[in-house]
Image (tube, rainbow, N blue to C red):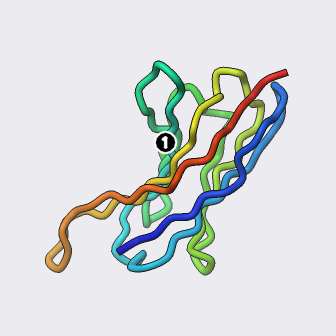
Amino acid sequence: QVQLVESGGGLVQPGGSLRLSCAASGSTFSINIMGWYRQAPGKERELVAAISSSGSTNYGDSVKGRFTISRDNPKRTVYLQMNGLKPEDTAVYYCNAHRSASAFMRSGDYWGQGTQVTVSS
């Protein structure tokens, strides 16, 4: 079992910055990839950024060059640094933890509760 707790969302003006945090607990040793997704009204949920257990990262096209995903292994926390925020970034942001199937565990996905990010003047 994996539990995810998100924090850091809020209201920010265009061009501003926010840092989201996702603290993981439980059987985190089994997680292969952690990432951030977002969903805005009328739009499908989309990948924002992801980071693998080896440190490889992947970003959605709309956030490349502006957002950075990182992790603090001792704290078992993943961060999303968001710079140069735009109104189009307004969405609920969800932390995700993915576990690939292994010899001992089934595959699975775990989600945080979501945190609202609003970019508006």
Quarter of the image for residue 12 reads top right
Q: Could you tell me which residue is drawn at 60 percent across and 58 percent down? A: 6
Q: Is residue 99 left or right of residue 48?
A: left
Q: Could you tell me which residue is drawn at 46 percent across and 69 percent down? A: 3
Q: Is residue 13 left or right of residue 21?
A: right
Between 57 and 81, the one nearer to me in the picture: 81
Quarter of the image for residue 101 reads bottom left
Q: Is residue 10 left or right of residue 32?
A: right
Pinpoint residue 88: horizontal percent, then vertical percent: 64, 21
Indicate the quadrant containing the C terminus: top left, top right, bottom left or bottom right.
top right
Pinpoint residue 109: horizontal percent, then vertical percent: 32, 57
7 over 3 or under it: above or below: above
Mark 1, Cα crowd under 10 Å, few <14 / some 14-19 / many 20+, is some
Pinpoint residue 1: horizontal percent, then vertical percent: 35, 75
Secondary structure of the residue carrying tag 1 is: strand
- Count the marks: 1
Amino acid type at circle 1 is Tyr
Q: Could you tell me which residue is drawn at 57 percent across and 38 percent down? A: 92
User: What is the residue that sits farthest to the left in this orientation?
Assistant: 103
Pinpoint residue 10: horizontal percent, then vertical percent: 75, 42
Q: Which residue is mark 1?
A: 37
81 over 27 or under it: above or below: above
Q: Is residue 35 left or right of residue 99?
A: right
Q: Could you tell me which residue is drawn at 73 percent across and 50 percent down? A: 19
